[in-house]
Structures are given as C-alpha cells and as structure tokens.
Image (cartoon, rainbow, N blue to C red):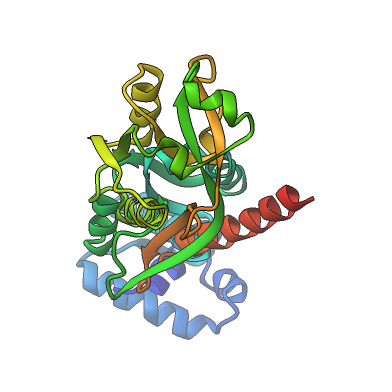
Amino acid sequence: MELRHLRYFVMVAEEKHFTRAAARLNMQQPPLSQQIRALEDELGFDLFKRHPKGVDLTTGGAVFLDEAKAILASVQAGSRRAARVAKGVEGTLAISFTSSAAAHPLIPRIIRAFREQYPAVSITLDEGNAGRLTKRAMAGQLDVGILRAPVSRPDGIEFHRLLVEELLMVLPIGHPTLADHPEAIELQAIRDEPFILVRRPGAPGMYANLLRACRAAGFEPHVAFEVERMLTNVSLVAAGEGVSVVPASMRDIHSESVVYRRILGARPRLVAPLTLICRGFNQSPALQNFIVLARQLAKAYRTQVLR
C-alpha cells in the first residue's frame, strides 16, 4: 500500500464517481479503477458499492476513509515540520555559557534576537565552566557553548571569537592604592596583595596570562583564593579578601563596594575574549542560523563600541 493509493481512494470517496475523480487526479479512469481494486484486494474487503450513477462507501470503506485522511494529514504535517526544521526555523538548541560570558550584554542580546527571529526553535539554557562546556560540546550534549578563552582546542570543535574586551583590576572601596591611581593602575602597585582568581581548569588562558604579566612586572603573585566563577571573585573583593581581575563588561557588579581600574603596562596585554564554540560536523540548520546571527550581532556590537 502506497500513499498514492490512499489519495486515489479519498478522491473517489469525495467525488463518489470514478470518472470525476480521475479528472481531478489528471489520470484516466481505467487505471484509477485498477488501483482502487488492487487496494481492495490488499485490504481484503470492498471499499465501494458500485452502481450506475457512481459509487458509495461500504461500511468498511467509511471507517477506512477516516483513517486514510488522518494518515495523509499526518504525512502532510510531518512534511511541513520537516521542511521547517531543515530550514532551521523549527527544532531545538541547547546553549550553555560561563557566568562571566553571560554577564556580557551581547549574549542576552543574541539569545533574545534569536528567539524573536525563530520562535519555533526550543532553546534550553545551562551554565558551566569552560572546560565542562568544551567536553559537553565534544560529546554532542550541547549545541552552543559561550565562554571566554578556550581551555583546549579539540578536533571537531569550531571556535568563533565574537569579540575581545580588556580585563580590569577590581579592588575594594577605600583600598589605599586607589589614592595614587584614580584612573588606572600598574600591576607593580598591587604586588603585595592577595589575588582572587578563577580556578585554572575554568579559565586557564586568562589565569596563565595574568601570572605571566605579574612575573614580567617583577613579582610572583600570591593567589589567596581560587573560585569557580568570576562573579564570586567580585564578591570576595567586596568582602575585603583581596584583589582580582575581571572582564570590563562586569564593571557594574557590586559597584557600591568595589572599584574597577584599567591595568597599565601589562605584558602580555590582559584581555578577555568572548568565544562561541560548537561542533563542526553535522550541524543542525538551527545551529547554523544561531552562528550567523551571533556573528552579525557581534560585528554590530564591535562597530558600536568603536564609535
């Protein structure tokens, strides 16, 4: 039994006449009659009672008509949905991000714009550190990861750098160093301070760059705390437990308790990239649409910042 058999049957049932049904199907009447007879033979019962003026449905035919219409409607709906998924306007998208990446205004802007453009795509959101996001992307457990500096670059993973922003020094309000550094501060000026940093597995690139910059400035930093998230960095600084560095987009967090300062003369330059990672193979159309939109909005954001 093929779908065309069901379409032929429904057309004859609607017209109650083989010749009129054949005309609507753009075929000859004899082949149509042969196809209906073959369907009846396969089912094992008559679908129509034939008479000089046309045909009427048998009891079994009436029941089968409802089923045939339901099957055809289901196939049509499935075809439409499959076409929408193939175009990326319907489907699912699993997005995960680090806390510091989510704090950047570009990320909620991208997600909101994607929801508005593709409302039929179901989005799930999750959080984790960069190492966990990379492993989940490799395992196919998430579609998009948004993080700062990649912890590794495994085969099969794409990396899209959306933008780069500077890292700022964070000090508690009233810190004595601030009196001599009202706008910017050199690393040398806080050489004796305890540092609060995100753990190496969570942000190894930025962690390592800060250590190198401190050593280039002539001292080995004292790392008093290693935390899971950059938001915790700022909270501990606000509590007077030490100093830290965070991306510039976090400068409004705990602004009543901490002060943010630009860092002068750091070698290497201390920056925080914003990176989108995803699998590079078998990408869904929804994922491809998200990548295109993210890159477009990131470009627009960079242009806006440079004005």
Q: Nearer the viewer, residue 70 or 91?
A: 91
Q: Position of residue 148 (x, y in %)?
A: 42, 52
Q: Does 184 sit left or right of 49 as displayed? A: right
Residue 178: in sight, yes or no?
yes
Q: Residue at x 55, y 84 (%)?
A: 28
The answer to whether residue 88 of the structure is visible from this angle is: no
In this rendering, is residue 260 above or below 74?
Answer: above
| Image spot of residue 217 (x, y percent) | 42, 52
Percent across and percent down for residue 117 are: 61, 48
Give left or right: position of 306 versus 75. right
Q: Quadrant of residue 51?
A: bottom left
Q: Is residue 193 above or below residue 254?
A: below
Closest to the observer, 17 or 189: 189
Q: From what the image shows, is residue 233 above or below residue 238?
A: below
Q: In the displayed image of the protein, which residue is found farthest to the right?
A: 307
- The image shows residue 157 at horizontal and vertical percentages of 34, 69
Identified at 48% across, 21% down, the residue is 176
Within the image, what quadrant is residue 101 found in? top left
Image quarter where the N terminus lies is bottom left
From the viewer's side, name the closer residue of 84 and 277.
277
* Total residue callouts: 0
Residue shown at 53%/14% (left/top)?
Answer: 256
- In the image, is residue 116 above or below residue 270? above
The quadrant in which residue 302 appears is bottom right
Q: Choose between 282 and 173: the one closer to the eye.
A: 173
Residue at image location 34% in from the left, 74% down from the top: 2
